[in-house]
Image (cartoon, grey):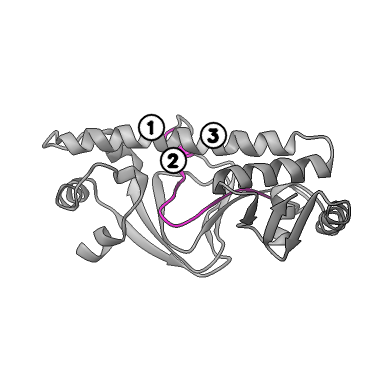
Amino acid sequence: MKKIISDLHSPLFAGISPEELDTMLGCIGFHVNSYPKGAVIALEEEHIRHIGIVLEGSVDMVKEDLWGNRTLLLRFRKDELFGETFACGADTRSIVTYTAAKDSRIFFLPFEKILRSCSNACVFHHRLIENMVEVIAGTHLNLLHKLNIISKKSLREKILTYLSLQAQEQGSRDFSLPLKRLELAEYLCADRSALTRELKNMKAEGLIDYDRNRFRIM
């Protein structure tokens, strides 16, 4: 238990001491699973009753159509939380699939018990609920950013909007992308070859410069 608590640095537990967290987890319950790269954590149409926190690795939220086209919606990294959007709904069936982007270790909490104060009515449990609301708001904000990007008419506009957001988040015009080319193509809902071609054109025109995943907005 101590090892797991020492690994938990999620915003979900902000303002809660290790001692309080130990007590609270004893009331709520939890489990930890490991997944190799590419493994499915939760399938589309599966009922989501637990929220997951990434202890190691990363998790992709993806959507596939009937023809097998894959769209990367969001990527969750260490300490980030996923699954809460569906776990907190009246219908807990997921409309996306969650997969391990790399070898990952995931901490799971039953969402129903998070919403209900434990028998001790502990103050830190109420803090947990407040934190959960903030985390859900953050996830929805990230999805709005994604919607803003893919709503652009041209691939160039999508790329520039995405790069602009990355520059803002990292506080510099010189930054590293968290996604590889194929992953970026999936995120932008674009063909990989078309993406590569457009990036080369933008570099030739002096709009951007890049070396692999290191980019600079000129």
Q: Whole-percent x and y of residue 172?
A: 60, 49
CA distance for labels 3 and 2: 14 Å
Q: Considering depth in this image, is 70 or 204 the residue closer to the camera?
A: 204
Q: Residues within 10 Å of mark 2 (few under 14, many from 20)?
A: many
Question: Mark 2 sits on what residue?
Answer: 84
**Mark 3 and mark 2 residues within 8 Å of each other at the beta carbon:** no
Where the N terminus falls, by quadrant? bottom left
Give the residue pinned by disc 3: 141
Type of amino acid at the residue the image marks with label 2: Glu
Instruction: Give the side of residue 203 with respect to residue 141, left or right.
Output: right
Region rendered in magenta: 71-88
State yes or no: discs 3 and 1 in contact (Cβ < 8 Å).
no
In this rendering, which labeled residue sits more in front, label 3 or label 1?
A: 3
Distance of mark 3 from mark 1, alpha carbons? 12 Å
Q: For numbered disc 1, what is the local secondary structure? A: helix
Which residue is painted at 35% across and 41% down in the image? 111
| Res. 110 image quadrant | top left
Residue in the image at 47% along x and 44% along y: 47
Q: Which mark is residue 213?
A: none
Left or right: 176 with respect to 94? right
Percent of width and height locating residue 61: 58, 50
Q: Is residue 15 above or below residue 38?
A: above
- Which callout, 3 or 1, points at the residue further toward the start of the chain? 1
Q: CA distance from mark 2 to mark 1?
A: 10 Å
- Asked if the magenta segment contains residue 196, the reply would be no
Residue behind mark 1: 133
**In x, y percent, where is residue 6?**
26, 61
Above/below status of 39 relative to 170: below
Query: Element at badge 2?
Result: helix
